[in-house]
Image (tube, rainbow, N blue to C red):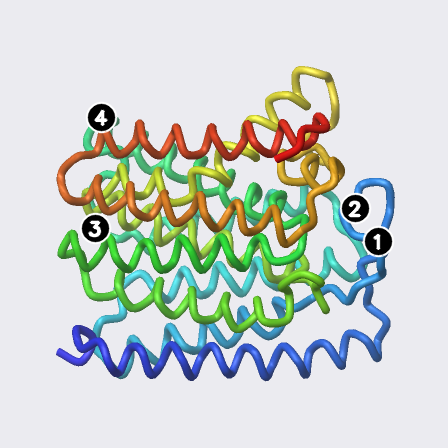
Amino acid sequence: MAGAEPWPLMGAAAALGLAVWAATGLVLRLLTRLRLYDRPNERSSHAVATPRGGGLALVPLLLAAWIAWGLWSGTAPAGLQPVVLGTVLLALISLADDLRGLSAVLRLAVQAGAVALGLIGLGEAGPVFQGLLPPLADRLAAAFLWLWFLNLFNFMDGIDGISGVEAASVGLGLALVAVLGGLAAELVALPVLLAAAALGFLAWNRPPAKLFLGDVGSIPLGYLLGWLLLAAAAQGQWAAAMILPLYYLADATVTLAKRGLRGEKVWQAHRGHFYQLAVQGGLSHGAVVLRVLACNAALVGFALLATAGWPWPALAGAAFAVLVLLAGLGHRAAGGDI
């Protein structure tokens, strides 16, 4: 089967990465001409007005690549169509939010609708929670986690390069897990293509960033990653699906809990994430992202250990790696020397 051959996939990934790189350059020129900037404010982690909306290149090209690969290889999952539709809806509402700002209630309603559509994309896949919940409760819990994940991915997109590195790390990690675990062919190809698109964008977003993803990029990207992670969990790789995005999950969730306990409006933009505090403490964007990349490399290793049949030691190791990263970022924020 074509979908199982590595070289055509590698060629498609390289072509997609180059296409995203070239298209992002064109989008940058357009955004600059239209003066669509993310301007620094008290909640920003950057000091220079920077064009926002790089997702206008990444998201359409990634969706086109997924569809084209599925048609060519014959490995497109039956639920890809509703996921693509959900992604388009999210990109449109997020673009409107980038341009003029929308209410949190409207954004959340559209996101919930996209998640409901995407659950169709899981089709007849097994239970995400491995049979611990009744079928309806399993899907409702999966929907809640997916909704949280796409939002936390957006929350975490606050410094140069971080979300490109995260998306590429999780995408490549998922592909390796799929190969080692003998998962469906699409769980090899689709994450590889997503990682390639993220790397093509990262060429423009690496520190110092020439442009940002914007909500039009980060929200759909979080949505697609969430779907792939849930699909891997539904095929039995629940531990790997927890481990791969664990740094983003931990930083965003702990920060949200802290802000909630302080009585702050958790849906408002802020600079309270561990990675943001480390930047305020003196680390450069690049230094923080390199630390995240090192942690993600460890998480990929632990995900593969879980796939090989050692889920609990892998989860323990992954938790320790993330705790070390959070402690290091927090120490720097407090004025340490690391």
Residue at left 53%, top 58%? 220
Q: Are marks 1 and 2 in contact (CB under 8 Å)?
A: yes
Name the quadrant containing residue 175.
bottom left
Q: Which-is-in-front pick, marks 2 and 3?
A: 2
Residue picked out by circle 3: 124
Residue at left 26%, top 64%? 188
Residue picked out by circle 4: 132
Q: In the picture shown, does residue 12 fall above or below 103?
A: below
- Residue 283 location in percent, x, y? 69, 43
- Element type at marker 2? loop
Of residues 215 and 50, which is closer to you in this image? Answer: 50
The furthest residue to the front: 337
Side of 194 relative to 269 (left or right): left
Q: Report how far apart the C-alphas of labels 1 and 2 lie in the structure.
A: 8 Å
Circle 2: residue type:
Ser
Q: Earlier in the sequence, mark 3 or mark 1?
A: 1
